[in-house]
Amino acid sequence: MAKPDQVAKKWHLVDANDEVLGRLASDIAVYLMGKHRPEYTPHVDCGDFVVVINADKVAMTGRKMEARHYTWYTGHPGLRLESYADRQERKPEDLIYHAVRRMLPKNKLATQMLSKLKIYAGPEHPHSAQQPVEMKRVGKKANAANA
């Protein structure tokens, strides 16, 4: 079993350009939880840091960008609605953030794991000193590239 002080955190880089949101978010969640490591322990945060670039170019299949909506309650009468396409124009980082947040466990460790996720709308990021390596994807696109 892994101990919290014995886990070495690595940095991974993901380019979200033309990636499907759900598949990208599930791969990121695996790395944040540490399930890609052989010493994975559920009650210890043994995940790595993940830097996502080009968040404004993430894609969704079908018509989900227009058909699905974020809803929230402001405290005043009525609900607020915003389509995924509108949210991508206004706050492109939020699409990936909320998709990954919902795939993490619902406990106190999730906030720790989510703090290791760094999302940027453009291709530049300030984490070059940490020397992030390209994240190995387990999805369909990664298998097609390896074949």
Image (cartoon, grey):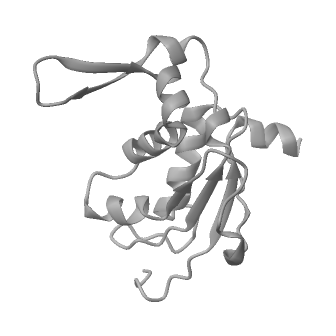
Number of labelled discs? 0
> Could you tell me which quadrant the C terminus lies in?
top right
Please identify the residue farthest to the right as the structure is shown: 147
Residue 102 position, x and y percent, is: 37, 42
Q: Is residue 129 above or below residue 123?
A: below
Q: Answer with the quarter of the image where residue 129 lies.
A: bottom right
Q: In this rendering, would 49 be left or right of 132?
A: left
* Residue at the (41%, 71%) spot, across then down: 45
Q: In front here: 119 or 28? A: 119
Residue 48 position, x and y percent, is: 55, 68
Q: In front here: 13 or 3? A: 13
* Residue at the (32%, 19%) spot, across then down: 81
> Could you tell me which quadrant the N terminus lies in?
bottom left
Q: In this rendering, would 147 be left or right of 32?
A: right
Q: In front here: 9 or 94? A: 94
Q: Is residue 112 above or below residue 65?
A: below
Please identify the residue farthest to the bottom as the structure is shown: 5
Q: In this rendering, would 21 be left or right of 78?
A: right
Residue 119 position, x and y percent, is: 56, 52
Q: Is residue 115 above or below residue 97?
A: below
* Residue at the (57%, 33%) spot, across then down: 21
Residue 67 position, x and y percent, is: 46, 11
Q: Is residue 145 above or below residue 28?
A: above
* Residue at the (34%, 59%) spot, across then down: 110
Q: In this rendering, would 67 be left or right of 122?
A: left
